Amino acid sequence: MTDWRAQKKAATRRSIQEHALRLFQRQGYEATTVEQIAAAAGVSHMTFFRYFPRKEAVVEDGDYDPLLEQLLAGRPADEAPLTALHGAVRAVCEAIVADEHDALLARVRLTMNTPVLRSRLWIAAESTQELFACGLARRAGLAEPDLACRVRAGAALAANGAALQRWANTAGADLIALIDDAFAALGVAV
């Protein structure tokens, strides 16, 4: 019964996000209300808030960090730190692009072109950078990230962000190739 409930929750969450993205593209982010999103998804506005604490979270929330953390931990122990980060980021993006290409592209474009969402990107980036740094620390056998872990995490985050921005602004671009190019610019063998 628990699996059924989890699947139903995941389906409802996805439905809310899909309807929200369609409305944002048609009406614009600012003009779209939570009530409109809930109605389009066939849920109450209270149900909307059970899944997303605010309208911005529909765009921000991708649930990719646990997968990224798992993939980073699973990289070969002898890999250089930035190579391991590149491999993990690349694998996550391959999985997302395979399943959710259009939705991801719409979310990235919406985030880049909507000031309130773009400003919130700093908060999300801080969390992802901490995840990268902690993952590198664990790989190195450290209890806490040292300066080298934090610098590498920041560099990987910048490479990923530059690739996503280029992808959002270049019609028909290949996200995986852009990620490879961005990490190559950091001196990572691709």
Image (cartoon, rainbow, N blue to C red):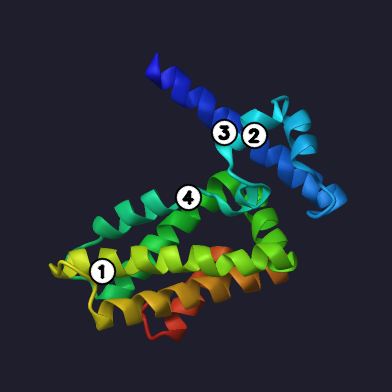
| Extreme residue toward the left, this view | 141
User: Mark 3 or mark 4: which comes first in sequence?
Assistant: 3
- Which residue is at the front of the view, 172 or 7? 7
Q: Would residue 173 be visible to someone looking at this image?
A: no
Label 1 SS: helix
User: Mark 4 or mark 2: which comes first in sequence?
Assistant: 2
Name the side, left or right, on which 168 lies relative to 123: right
**Callout 2, which amino acid?**
Phe
Alpha-carbon span between mark 2 and mark 3: 5 Å
Residue 159 place in picture, x, y as percent:
48, 76
Name the side, left or right, on which 112 lies relative to 124: right
Displayed quadrant of residue 38: top right
User: Mark 1 or mark 3: which comes first in sequence?
Assistant: 3
Give the residue pinned by disc 3.
Answer: 50
Image: 93 above or below 26:
below
Q: Residue at x 36, y 67 (%)?
A: 130
Give the residue pinned by disc 2.
Answer: 48
Q: Are marks 1 and 2 in contact (CB under 8 Å)?
A: no
Give the residue pinned by disc 4.
Answer: 95
Alpha-carbon span between mark 1 and mark 3: 33 Å
Q: Residue at x 52, y 31 (%)?
A: 10
Q: Nearer the viewer, mark 3 or mark 4?
A: 3
